[in-house]
Image (cartoon, helix red, strand yellow):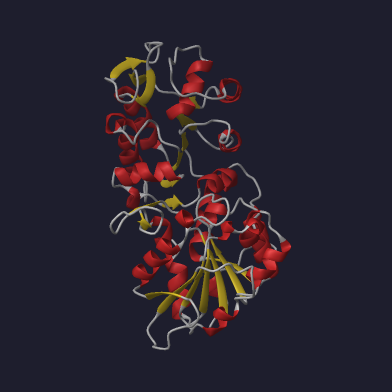
Amino acid sequence: MIKSITSVKVTGRRVILRAGFDVPLKEGRGGKGEGEELIVADDTRIKDVLSTLKYLIGQKAKIIVMSHLGRPEGWDKSKSLRPVAEKLAQLLNFKFVEIVDRIPSYSVPHLYFFAQDITKQDHSGWSKKISAGNILFLENLRFYPGEQQNDEEFVEVLARFGDVYVNEAFSVAHRKDASTFGLARKLPAYGGVNFIKEIRSLQKIISNPAQPFVFMVGGAKIDDKIETIHNLAQHASQIIVGGAVANAFLAAHGYEIGGSKVSDVPLARQLLRSYKTKIVLPVDLVTAPNPAGTASLVKVDGVKKAEQILDIGPESVRKFSGLIKQAQTLVWNGPFGLFENPKFAFGSKSLAQVFASRSKGKAFGVIGGGETVEVFDLAKVSQFVDHVSTGGGAMLEFLAGKELPAIKALEGK
């Protein structure tokens, strides 16, 4: 069982908070490029950590925030966490300061950003110098090779910054990194408020879900979702399939899919053999020669070789909606079309609205994966879903019944 950070006294102690701040950035404040003018494009993952942060601030802990951003190869200014630190300071109404050689003496709440390489010399003294209730924010952990290698020496470097560890980065719970696994084994370790909420919500799906249980799966690839499909199929009443994942099933049935994105048709055949009575496919589709071309509505057997499948049609929406409206448990991972293009967003947005209307009371609804969350934000219905998972890959692995390293490290305590 994972202990919550709210169960331990942290006043005056240095608490390392591993956050999941892998957020999108965009040019702003003049847009000069080269990384120096980047700002946060979507602060959802930052806001997800506020419950734990505000608890630690209220308890007068000294908070050391660690995270990664993107997949940098070495030190890359465009992947600096400075814009994230600035946004967090803004959300908390803290004064943002980059530490160079001293900490300001005036006593207002501060977020101190430390941009220097913490492996060149021991910089952990800064974590002792900050005032209680203040934050020391370190630079991108993936600037260091030791992070993803779970290198013991790098774990030691990180451990010098704190007395207590709290994980609030469920999005990387499936990674055996220094900051998510090694550090949790090194220090007294706890789960953050949202981290524990994630586990409880997902555990509800795989332990004893209320029936009927409908699992909706879309997106681009089937291979990274097959284990989840296998595991949830044991409990699910129906598995509704859309997006490019559905293309593989349609091809497995022998339907023409034209130039549509598709992968792993043999996997789709295998799933059809195992769960033929549970898998529900589209009955009509929206196609076009390319995303910029003229769209056409066709039945599943009417796709032309020169066309691409880019959305589901209204009959499919009606069919899927009927199943969603009967469900007591709902899970959705992966969009059902090229929703980024307004011409092909109808299917995903319509189903998101039905899904949300069924959640919070009538059924227990969970969504996860960055693009799925984008669909619900686009439809303006995210707030009506019971649980919005911050981790796409981590959510899929948890629902597949796999043991996640970060959870294992916390349970070991």
Asked if 190 appears above or below 39 in the picture, the reply is below
Say if residue 269 shows up in the picture: yes
Is 296 placed left or right of 113 in the picture?
left
Q: What residue is shown at x 34% (from left), y 32% (from top)?
A: 321
Tell me if 64 is positioned left or right of 290 in this view. right
Above or below for 192 versus 227: below
345 and 5: which is toward the camera: 345
- Image quadrant of residue 223? top right
In this picture, is 311 found above or below 175?
A: above
Q: Residue 323 location in percent, x, y?
A: 39, 32
Q: How many marks do you count on the picture?
A: 0
Camera sees residue 283: no
Q: Position of residue 113 (x, y in %)?
A: 46, 71
Q: Looking at the figure, which quarter contains the C terminus?
A: bottom right
Q: Quadrant of residue 119?
A: bottom right
- Residue 304, position in %: x, y? 38, 11
Can you say which quadrant of the picture contains the N terminus? bottom right
Q: Residue furthest right?
A: 152
The one of 375 and 113 positioned closer to us in this rendering: 113
Q: Is 83 positioned to the left or the right of 162 in the image?
A: left
Is 403 placed left or right of 129 in the picture?
right
State the image coordinates of residue 40 (x, y, percent, origin top left).
Answer: 37, 57
Q: Which of 298 and 161 is in front in this view?
A: 161
Q: What residue is at 43 percent from the left and 29 percent from the top?
A: 243
